[in-house]
Image (spheres, grey):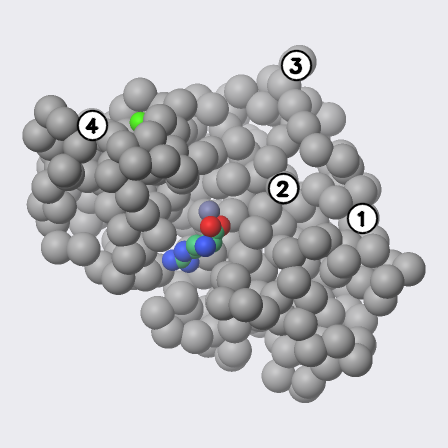
């Protein structure tokens, strides 16, 4: 991935209450956050500890809102089984998912902030679902998940990134420049967060692929950038985006 890489984004809003029918401005605020976080122009990028500054990345991928679809529903929660992506079951079908990143904004329920489909899955369910309470800035966005970082994290998954702890105790996230982490970190850990995985080192709790509050996460690494960029080149799982 070189030069100008732009991912067209379609936002699909499913609402039962007026509040769930979030404003165009709230939607655009989320696109703006993605653009900042994926180009290292987010103001808090500067909070990256010196220890990690050498691996902190400008991913160099940008996002452009191309369409907003809205649909009223009687469903009060959609769960995590892709029903929101199925028009026959009351959801909204993905728009050209091989060339657009589809986002579904709805009430998911069960305390789930959002979930993503990894590359390589069925195109009809490809994309990211995010609860409207954790999408964008202001409006329905709820502290401490009101800085749009649920989308930054989920789009990271959509671009093949694993959780920084590798979903196992001191697990492997398949990225060499992210230090091994014991498990998910929550809240806003005070730096340095010394790992209990050996040998002794500090965990990168400020990575978007940890589980901290939105204000605690503000960087991707070069290794994560390589993994994401590889998808879009010829032969990559998202080469259809043509970028
Ligand atoms: N729990 C969700 C996931 O595993 C998202 C976590 C997002 N964190 C945040 N601070 N917004 O994909
Ligand atoms: Zn995740
Ligand atoms: Ca790693």
Label whose residue precedes the other's in the sequence (1 or 3)? 1
Q: Residue at x 38, y 29 (%)?
A: 173
Residue 189: name its quadrant.
bottom left
In the rendering, which numbered label is found on residue 95? 1
Give whichever of 95, 180 is nearer the camera: 180
Q: Which residue is mark 4?
A: 54
Looking at the rendered image, the quarter that the C terminus falls into is top right
Q: Is residue 206 above or below residue 1?
A: below
Q: Which residue is mark 3?
A: 234
Which of labels 2 and 1 is toward the front?
A: 2
Residue positioned most to the front: 169
Label whose residue precedes the other's in the sequence (1 or 4)? 4
Q: CA distance from mark 4 to mark 3?
A: 29 Å
Dot 1 crowding, Cα within 10 Å, few <14, some 14–19, many 20+: many
Q: CA distance from mark 2 to mark 4?
A: 30 Å
Residue 190: name its quadrant.
bottom left
Residue 3 at x, y = what percent? Answer: 52, 25
Residue 74 at x, y = what percent? Answer: 79, 80
Q: CA distance from mark 1 to mark 3?
A: 22 Å
């Amino acid at each position: 991935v070189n030069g100008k890489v732009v991912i067209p984004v379609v936002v699909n809003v499913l609402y039962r209450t007026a509040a769930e029918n979030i404003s165009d401005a709230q939607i655009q605020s989320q696109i703006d956050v993605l653009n900042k976080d994926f180009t290292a122009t987010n103001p808090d990028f500067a909070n990256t500890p010196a220890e990690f500054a050498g691996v902190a990345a400008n991913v160099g991928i940008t996002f452009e809102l191309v369409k907003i679809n809205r649909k009223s529903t009687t469903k009060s929660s959609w769960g995590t089984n892709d029903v929101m992506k199925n028009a026959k079951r009351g959801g909204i079908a993905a728009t050209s998912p091989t060339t657009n990143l589809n986002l579904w904004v709805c009430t998911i329920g069960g305390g789930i902030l959002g979930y993503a489909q990894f590359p390589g899955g069925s195109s009809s369910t490809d994309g990211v679902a995010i609860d409207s309470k954790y999408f964008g800035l202001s409006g329905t966005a709820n502290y401490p998940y009101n800085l749009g970082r649920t989308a930054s994290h989920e789009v990271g998954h959509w671009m093949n990134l694993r959780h920084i702890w590798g979903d196992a105790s001191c697990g492997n996230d398949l990225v060499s420049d992210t230090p091994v982490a014991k498990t998910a970190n929550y809240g806003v850990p005070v730096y340095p967060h010394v790992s209990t995985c050996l040998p002794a080192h500090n965990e990168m709790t400020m990575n978007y692929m940890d589980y901290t509050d939105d204000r605690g996460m503000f960087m991707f690494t070069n290794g994560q950038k390589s993994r994401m960029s590889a998808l879009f080149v010829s032969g990559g799982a998202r080469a259809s985006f043509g970028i």
